[in-house]
Each structure stands twice: as C-alpha cells, then as structure tokens.
Amino acid sequence: MWTFGRKLTVGFSLSFALLLIIGVMSYRGVDSLTGTSYQVTRTHQAEAHIAALLSAMKDAETGQRGFMLTGDDAYLDPYRTAAADIPRLLAELRPLIRDNPAQQTRLNQAAIMMENLMSLHKDRIELRRTASMEAALKQIQTGDGKRRMDELRAVIDQMQDAEEEVLRQRAADVETTAGNVRNAIVYGTVACLLLVLGAAFVLNRALSGQVGAAVRHVQRSAAELQAAANQQAAGARETATSMTEISTTISELLATSRQIADSAQRVVQIAEQTAGYARGGEGTLQGARDTIVAMRRQIDQVVGHMLDLGQKSQRIGVVLDLVGELAEQTNILAINATIEATVAGDAGRRFGVVADEIRKLADRMTATTKEIRLQIDDVRGAVNTTVMATEAGSKAVDAGARQFDDVAATFARIAGQVVTTTEAAREIELSTKQQATAVEQLNIALSNTAQASRETETSSGQTSQTATELAETSRQLLSLVQAQPT
C-alpha cells in the first residue's frame, strides 16, 4: 500500500516531469527559431551582396559607355568604384553561401563573367584612349558587352531566385517550429492542469482516508499511553525506593574500596623499600665478589712468584754444585801445592804458605756452600709448602666466589620478585582506585537515577494529562478531515 508521502511524491514528480518536457521542447523550439532567424538574416545579407554585385557591374558598364562616348575621365568614376568594390563583395558573399554548393557554383561562374566583363571594359577604355571614337563605337556595336551582361544578369537572377527559395523554406521552418512550440505549451499546460487536478483529487481522498486512520490510531495510542503512564508512575516509585537502598550499599562499598586502596598504597611503599634494600644488597655482593676476584688474581700472582722462586732455587743449587766441585778441586790443588812446597824446601816455603791459605779458603767455601745448600733446601721446602697452601686458598677463594655468585643470583631473584610484587601492588592500588572511582560514579548515577525516577513519577502525571489532551486533539483532527454524518 502506498503511503501518503509516496503518493504526493509521485504526483509532484509526474507534474515536474511534464513541465520539464514542456520546457525542453520549448527551449529546443526557441533555439531552432533563433538559429533560423540567424540563417534568414544571412540570406538577406547574401541577397544584398548579390544585388550590390549587379549594381556595381551596371555602374561599371555605365561609366565605360559614358567614357566611350565622351572621352571624359570623369565618367570613369563609377567604373573605378565598381572595380574596387567587386572583389570585396565577392569575398564577403562567399561565407554567406558556404552551406549551399549550388550557389557557390553559380558564384564562381558569375565571378568569371564579371572578370571577363571588367577586362572587356578595360580593353575598350584603352582603345578609346588610343584610337578614334569610331573604332570604339564599332566595338560597342558588336553587342559582345551586352551579351555578356545579359548572361551575367541571368546567373545573378538564378542566385537571387535561389536565395528567395531559401527564404521561403526557412520561413516555413519558422512557422513549423513556432507551431510545435505553441502546441507543446498549450497541450502541455492542459496536461499539467489535468494531472494536478487528478493528483489533488487522489491526494484528497488519500489524506481523508489515511489521516483518518492515523487519527484513530492516535486515539488508541493515547489511551494506551495514559495506561502506560499510570504504570510508569507506580514503577518509578518502586525504582526510587530500590535506588535508595542500592545507594546505601554502594556507599558502604565505597568506604571499603578506599580502605583497600590505602592498604595497597602502604604495601607498595613497603615493597619499594624492600626493592631498594635488595638492590643495595646486590650491589654489596657485587663489590665483595669483585674483591674476591682481585684476591684470586693476587694469589695466582703469588703462586707464580713462588714457582719462579723454586725454579731459581734449583738453578742456584746447580751453581752451588759447581762451586762445591770447584772448592774440592781447589782443595786438592792446594794439598798438592803444599806437598810440592815441602819437597822444595826453603824455595817453596812461600808457595806453601799461599797453598795453605788457598786450602783454608777452599775449606771455608765448601762449608759455606753446604750452609747455602741447606738454606736453599729450606727455601725450597717453604716454597713448596707456600704453593700448596696458596692452591688450597685459591680453591677456597673459588668456592667462596661461587657461593657469592649463588648469593648474588638469589638476591637478584629476590629483587625481581620484589619488583613483581611492587608492580602487582601498584596494579592492585590502581584497580582499587579505579574501582573506588567507578563506585563513586555509580553512586552518582544511582543518585541521578533516583532523581530521574522521582522526576519520572512527576512527569507520568503530566504524560497522562497530555494523553488526554492528545485524544481530544485527535477527535478534533478527525472531524476536520472527514465529514461528520448528519
């Protein structure tokens, strides 16, 4: 079923379409009339130029004859004017007949004839200037000029007749176009009037039927609205009571949320302090570990020096062995020298004293070497003992370093757990604050809802009154669009 708005739209759309068709046809007719009027004007201009060409040729012939008879140059003024005007008139005439091939052919033929006539006139004028009057008259009496002029007049008459025919055709086109425009306007206007009257009749019936049905529906809706308003008022009172109870509960929940938020904030502070202590302990452990590493490097250096000392002691022992051997050889040599000195008697006495001193020196050297060897052996024993003790200390340092690494890793994990605990506490604090904010907003919303419920209860009475007024207005509107039975 079509609605009233759709019917109204269709009626106006048809009227608009018909008016648009009339406007388009009228515009095209006026445009055609305008083009035809331009063509008619051009045809009149072409006729004027054709007549001007014929008049110029007549003036040229008249001026030539006057000069032939009198020999006076004053008679040649029309000839000279015609000689200057004819090329201009031909040039202006050609665009005016460019849409007519037959006329262009005639114009080309006439142009050749006029050129020949003008040449003939020029020859006769020259003949009159150079010969006697009798010779010039004989040229005139031949009738060649008259024959050519008659032929030119025939061609120009054909051109004028053709232009007249074009004028008659264009006049007929103008009349036909004007008649079409008049018919379009008249018949279109009548059709528009009939369409508007029919649409008005249909719309009147549709308005009476649909608006009447709508008014009756409004009456029923007004009664339902009044009943709904009463129910709404009762529901609004119950909602207001419930909102009051919920608001009290929300207030208690808001106080609890604030306490939780405060506790979470304290937990965050304690967790941050713990994280700080953990980071400080981690730094202390790192410093102790660096110290142990330095001790390990120093112990390694001591071990290296001890091993180097042991090697040097061994080399000193080798040297002492050589020194001992030298001392024994020296002692043997000294003994041999003493024996030889005794055998020599007084001559070898001084040599014996020297040999005795050398032997004593060798004995002291041997004793000293033995003492040095004993001290070197003691040094070797001390070095070996120190190396073994240093290796044990190095192992203890390594074990301590590993324990420090374990403790540092444990502190790092503790610090990470504390950071995680801090972040969780912050999230709890943030969530609790958001919850408190949401509870506050909910409390405000519930307060607004309670206020709205009271306002709804107040407006329900107004709605009931409005429904009554709407029912009365619908009855009045129904009496306006439908005839009441008498």
Image (cartoon, grey):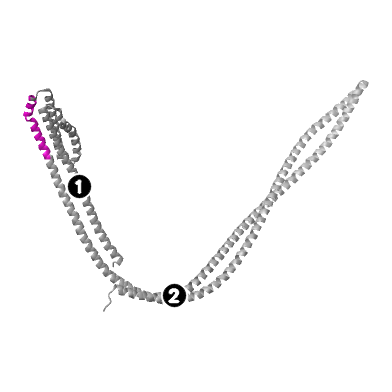
Give the residue at the far top of this rendering: 347
- The answer to whether residue 293 is above or below residue 247 is above
Q: Nearer the viewer, mark 1 or mark 2?
A: 1
Residue 88 appears in view: yes
Looking at the image, which residue is at 20% across and 45% down?
Answer: 38
The quarter of the rendered structure image containing the N terminus is bottom left
Residue 150 in the magenta stretch? The answer is yes
Taking depth in this image into account, of 147 and 169 the one nearest to the observer is 147
Tell me the chief SS of the magenta region: helix
- Which numbered disc flags the more N-terminal residue, 1 or 2? 1
Looking at the image, which residue is at 27% across and 61% down?
Answer: 13
Q: Which kind of residue does numbered mark 2 sit on?
A: Ser
Q: Residues within 10 Å of mark 1 (few under 14, many from 20)?
A: some
To which quarter of the image does residue 382 belong?
Answer: top right
Q: Which residue is mark 1?
A: 37
Report the disc number at residue 460.
2
Taking depth in this image into account, of 183 and 8 the one nearest to the observer is 183
Give the residue at the far bottom of this rendering: 486
Taking depth in this image into account, of 274 and 212 the one nearest to the observer is 212
Q: Which kind of residue does numbered mark 1 sit on?
A: Ser
Residue 97 lies, in percent from the top left, at 18, 40
Q: Horizontal placement of 19 versus 141: left or right?
A: right
Residue 56 lies, in percent from the top left, at 15, 35
| Chain part drawn in magenta | 134-158
To which quarter of the image does residue 86 belong?
Answer: top left
Residue 336 lies, in percent from the top left, at 87, 26
